Amino acid sequence: MPRRKPFSNKQKKKQLQVKREKKRGDTGSGQSSRNASAERGVRRDRQSDTSDSETTDIKRINQQPGSRDSRYDPNRFRLHFEKESKEDVENRKKIAQVRILQPVPERELEMDVSQVYPEEQGLDFPRRPSWHYGMQREELLRKEEVAFQQFRQALYSRNAPGTLSHFEHNLETWRQLWRVLEMSDVILLIVDIRYPVLHFPPALYHYITGPLQKQVILVLNKVDLCPAPLVLAWKHYLTTHFPSLHCVCFTSHPGQPYSTLLQKRRMRKKSGWSRAGGPIHIMRACQEITAGKVDLSSWEKKIQRDAVAMGTEGDWTDDGAETVVMEHHSDVAMEMNSPTQERYKDGVLTLGCIGFPNVGKSSVLNSLVGRKVVSVSRTPGHTKYFQTYYLTPTVKLCDCPGLVFPSRVDRQLQILAGIYPVSQLQEPYSSVGYLCERTPYMSALKISPPGQSADPMAPAVHAWTAWDVCEAWAEKRGYKTAKAARNDVYRAANSLLRLAMDGRLSLCLHPPGYTQGKVGVAPRVGRNRSPAGTKA
């Protein structure tokens, strides 16, 4: 019997592709069809990446497969960050393998907003250039591109290489911010309570309250991840330094804390934070701002009905859910929309929802609408397009994709805050080291040095590095490489970073002076709920 000829996966894939083309009736060959598909993808990239088409130092993140519908490009608003050199990545990897982890004093967790956004460094954000109705669309787009390039050149001229954090280089996403600021009467600026100074750019606050003459409601999201005294301390700090702010506390996951580090889901139970309380607080702040110029009684009734219709497990149900009108805005309508000084046009309050990636913006929007209308993901840059939702006939909500403003914060802290996608990291070990030096990782992970038994009576004399932590976690979780069956340290590092993003290994920044005035040390592992009856 003759020996069977090997048939590789590549040949099988090519065979299936030819069959599909024959079924569709394509007359061209498979190779030409693949070339045409590639050319279409290149054209889509060139159309969407207008802001940096001439640069090669930009890394485009979260590439999505193209659709046959040419009217919508899923990659138009994906994250564009500055590329890191291979030398820097390899150098950080080597340091993570040899540098001994040293616990950082709790005072080092205190961070002032001026440390993240120093005024003397010109950490502004790009503004939309002036225009008039006599301009053509192409002329306006070219003017915006020139202004954005000038903004980046000025920013890099005032900051040395390597000192700036990751920030958005995609002009299309900044254009969405301009539209939301122009269309909205009140701005909802959403921040993660664990890292509020990272997510609160003072330049944006001063621009909204100054030239635009609009009000800002600061939504302190994920308050169940921090102790109640820390929430109150951040609220006092922000309202003191920025008097025009209206601070509101919010959570989308009220309930008991995680009993174990790897618990799949938390039990729903009454606690100091409630999901229904967040929309009520935002509505009260809007009532104070509008001062009776807009009838918000229908919004208040809707919030009450949504609270009743919410399931007993705290999840939204389809029964009793109200219909919410949703609009998709065309590019032409948005680009030729001028800022207007008229507030509450036709008796409608327009709320603009702005925030960094992964601060829980989509969860806040779902809570305001009363049902799931935006998919939620811990991947930064998940929201890809501009939408508006009519909560009631008198309240409209505008959603904007997540934006990363330029700052001087450590890039490792940016990664822990969820600003940079963990799945796209080339070197996650330095971020793991940053986390371990600031959290009680040994008591939380319960790991032992690689190759040693987990004997609780054995003396803890091992000098840990970030690489050792990842290797020990891979050994405990059973993460192995496919071929050599070694400990998969890269997968372990990603797992640890995702635990930090989810709040199971919670790292919380403190306002200046918090450590000195604190009475007791609050736990920093897992989600923390405030005591019943505590208000923030």
Image: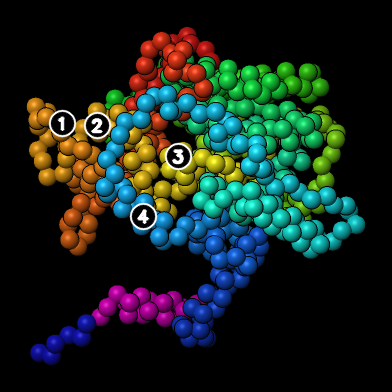
**How many residues crowd around disc 3 within 10 Å: few (fewer than 14), some, or many (20 or more)?**
some
Residue visible at 66% across and 24% down in the picture: 242
User: In this figure, which residue is indicated by the disc labeled 2?
Assistant: 442
Q: Nearer the viewer, mark 1 or mark 3?
A: 1
**C-alpha gap between disc 4 and disc 3:** 18 Å
Secondary structure beneath label 1? loop
Q: Amino acid at mark 2?
A: Met
**How many residues crowd around disc 2 within 10 Å: few (fewer than 14), some, or many (20 or more)?**
few
Residue visible at 71% across and 55% down in the picture: 150
**C-alpha gap between disc 3 and disc 2:** 20 Å
Residue visible at 62% across and 52% down in the picture: 156
Q: Which residues are magenta?
A: 7-24
User: In this figure, which residue is indicated by the disc labeled 4?
Assistant: 91
Task: Please tell me which of labels 1 and 3 falls first in the chain.
Answer: 3
User: In this figure, which residue is indicated by the disc labeled 3?
Assistant: 413
**C-alpha gap between disc 1 and disc 3:** 28 Å
User: In this figure, which residue is indicated by the disc labeled 1?
Assistant: 460
Q: Nearer the viewer, mark 1 or mark 2?
A: 1
The answer to whether mark 1 and mark 3 are in CB contact below 8 A is no
**C-alpha gap between disc 2 and disc 4:** 26 Å
Q: Was residue 8 drawn as part of the magenta stretch in this picture? A: yes
Q: Is residue 210 above or below residue 357?
A: above
Secondary structure beneath label 4? helix
Q: Amino acid at mark 3?
A: Leu
Q: Quadrant of the N terminus?
A: bottom left
Q: Is residue 347 above or below residue 58?
A: above
